[in-house]
Image (spheres, rainbow, N blue to C red):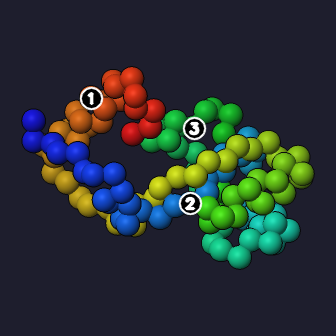
Amino acid sequence: GGCKPATPGSVSFNFAKKGRLCLNAEVDEDALLDYAIEADCEGDVSLESPDPDGRGDADTVKAVVMTEATELGALQAVLQENGIDCSGTLVNIPMATVEVSEEDEENNFKVIDRLEELDDVTNV
């Protein structure tokens, strides 16, 4: 009740497609910038903490790198060439977030739980 699915692609303009690399080693920002230069990255590259709750990062993930979607493969290759075990994926990052009431938050989580129970759904 109270939830209508959107048509495919109707809300995609609210998200930016980014590359997300999970590193099994710690890396500092200076080293990351050196790797990005070596990979000829021209877009933004940022270092983030692992997110085991929201993104399901494993305990082995020590750092997360966000990059432009088009530069994901090049940066991943350079990291691996330098002995850093990592895996990459494309993700959609919201361009804006909205504060919701506790009741709306609870309802959102109920919908997410119901979606995750569907056999055809792999990511929510």
SS at circle 2: strand
Residue 95: percent from left, percent from top? 40, 66
Where is mark 3, residue-wise?
A: 57
Q: Quadrant of the N terminus?
A: top left
Q: Secondary structure at mark 3?
A: loop
Q: Residue at x 80, y 72 (%)?
A: 40
Give the amino acid at mark 2.
Lys
Residue ID for mark 2: 18
- Residue 18 location, quadrant: bottom right
Earlier residue among tags 2 and 1: 2
Q: Are marks 2 and 1 in contact (CB under 8 Å)?
A: no
Marks 2 and 3, how far apart at CA: 17 Å
Q: In the rendered structure, which amino acid carries the disc numbered 1?
A: Arg
Question: Residue drawn 50% across and 41% down?
Answer: 55
Q: How many marks?
A: 3
Pointers 1 and 3 in contact (CB under 8 A)?
A: no
Residue 52 marker: none
Disc 2 residue crowd, few under 14, some 14–19, many 20+, Cα 10 Å:
some
Look at discs 2 and 3 and give the one toward the viewer.
2
Q: For the residues carrying marks 1 and 3, which lies nearer the camera in this image?
A: 1
Q: Which residue is mark 1?
A: 114
Outermost residue, bottom side: 42
Q: Is the C terminus in the top left, top right, bottom left or bottom right quadrant?
A: top left
Q: Residues within 10 Å of mark 3 (few under 14, many from 20)?
A: some
The quarter of the displayed image where residue 94 is located: bottom left
Q: Residue at x 10, y 41 (%)?
A: 2
- Of the residues under marks 2 and 3, which one precedes in the sequence? 2
